[in-house]
Amino acid sequence: MRVLVTGGAGFIGSTLVDRLLEEDDEVDVVDNLSSGSRLNIASAQSRSNACQFYELDIRSSEFDELVNDRRPEIIYHLAAQVSVAVSVREPLMDAELNVLGSLHVLDAARFSGVKKVVFAASGGTLYGDVPRSELPIAEGRPHSSSSPYGLAKRVVCDYLRLYQELYGLEYAAMALANVYGPRQDPHGEAGVVAIFARRLIAGSPVTINGDGLQTRDFVHVNDVVEAFVRAAKKSSSSIFNIGTGIQTSVNDLYAALASQVDGASPATHGPARTGDVEASALDSTLARDVLGWVPKVDLGEGVGSVLAFERQRT
Ligand SMILES: NC(=O)c1ccc[n+]([C@@H]2O[C@H](COP(=O)([O-])OP(=O)(O)OC[C@H]3O[C@@H](n4cnc5c(N)ncnc54)[C@H](O)[C@@H]3O)[C@@H](O)[C@H]2O)c1
């Protein structure tokens, strides 16, 4: 199958490219390298000539031409401005890329006979701040984004539904929890795993924001890309929560990492970050029932993969 991955030189996108090549897909990678890196896809390109890289912006006319020329069956759309904090500072820039850029991808898809778009939505920001007693969150919960980033992702989910109704373009919107794993950028949504790993390996002190009792649903990137591949193969159109359903506190995350590093010191605590949600976890029952997907990588194994990657980088 010929497929195209936007944002394919990024953390999740490049891991997806590796996974798609295992499926024997022909993979076109589009990325403007604003936060991604050629290094992330270097091994995919050296292993297989089924992987072509195009340094392009998804909003450019060259992108439309490429989609029209290559006529992929599936577009995996991951290119985005990924920082919640940046979206709060620059909502217009965020919308230009995350809303209009996404619409550009959807239009290119509908005019080129693409069958399905699989979109990286954000479960961590789609539903807003939900009381701990109501976690994990199921897909039926009303959307209530509290950042421009979350709102932009939500709007694209609405456009996907509308494009399906108006033009018959199938979609899967993957509402991701906090994704972590090798190649992760420390500035992303689950960047805390990469930050802690780097500091622990360097023997530098680690400061946890606030009391560390805030929780997140950390889902490993290998599990996430498996869900993307499965969603592409289904002909239904849905939003899927992709998380473990498990709340892990930042203190427990640190302990999981520190237990795998010789001589690690206890973390200290600094002021809490304003605007952070207190707790989050996603219920992925729909992905289990429809896609047969369950997360397989537990936290110990997952943080081990990050430590191994960071050790070999230094
Ligand atoms: N990491 C997470 O925990 C998480 C959680 C929820 C959703 N997501 C979503 O998953 C997707 C991938 O995130 P990531 O963590 O891999 O981040 P990333 O920054 O590593 O990947 C984004 C990629 O998009 C590229 N890009 C940005 N603007 C572009 C443009 N105009 N044209 C072409 N390419 C462009 C970047 O260069 C980068 O390679 C994003 O859509 C993000 O919003 C991530």
Image: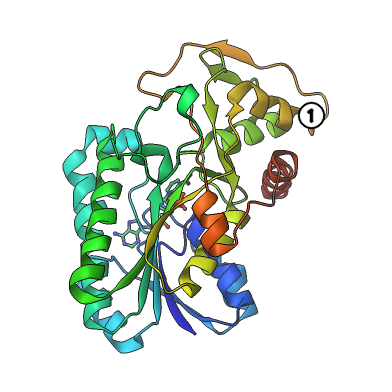
Q: Nearer the viewer, residue 100 or 169?
A: 169
Residue at 40% x, 24% y: name it: 276
Q: Is residue 191 above or below residue 75?
A: above
* Residue 173 seen in render: no
Q: Up-down: is 303 above or below 33? A: above
Q: Which residue is mark 1?
A: 259
Residue at the location (26% across, 52% down)? 98
The residue at label 1 has a CB less than 8 Å from ligand 1 = no
- Find residue 67 and report its image quarter: bottom left
Observer-nearest of 136 and 39: 136
Q: Is residue 87 left or right of residue 72?
A: left
Quadrant of the frame with the C terminus: top right
Q: Position of residue 145 (x, y in %)?
A: 29, 36
Q: Could you say where residue 45 lies in the image, as x and y percent from the top left?
A: 57, 75
Going by the image, does 52 lie left or right of 68? right
**Identity of the residue drawn at 71% across and 34% down:** 201
**What colour scheme governs how the chains and residues are painted in the rendered image of this protein?**
rainbow
Residue neighbourhood size for the residue with mark 1, other residues' Cα within 10 Å, grouped as few (<14), some (14–19), many (≥20)? few
**Is 33 drawn above or below residue 28 in the view shown?**
above
Q: Can residue 72 be seen in this snapshot?
A: yes
Left or right, residue 45 beside residue 8: right
Residue sitting at 30 percent across and 39 percent down?
A: 142
- Image x and y of residue 191, in percent: 51, 38
Q: Amino acid at mark 1?
A: Ser
> Residue 39: horizontal and vertical position, in percent?
55, 62
Q: Quadrant of residue 207?
A: top right
Dot 1: what SS? loop
Number of marks drawn: 1
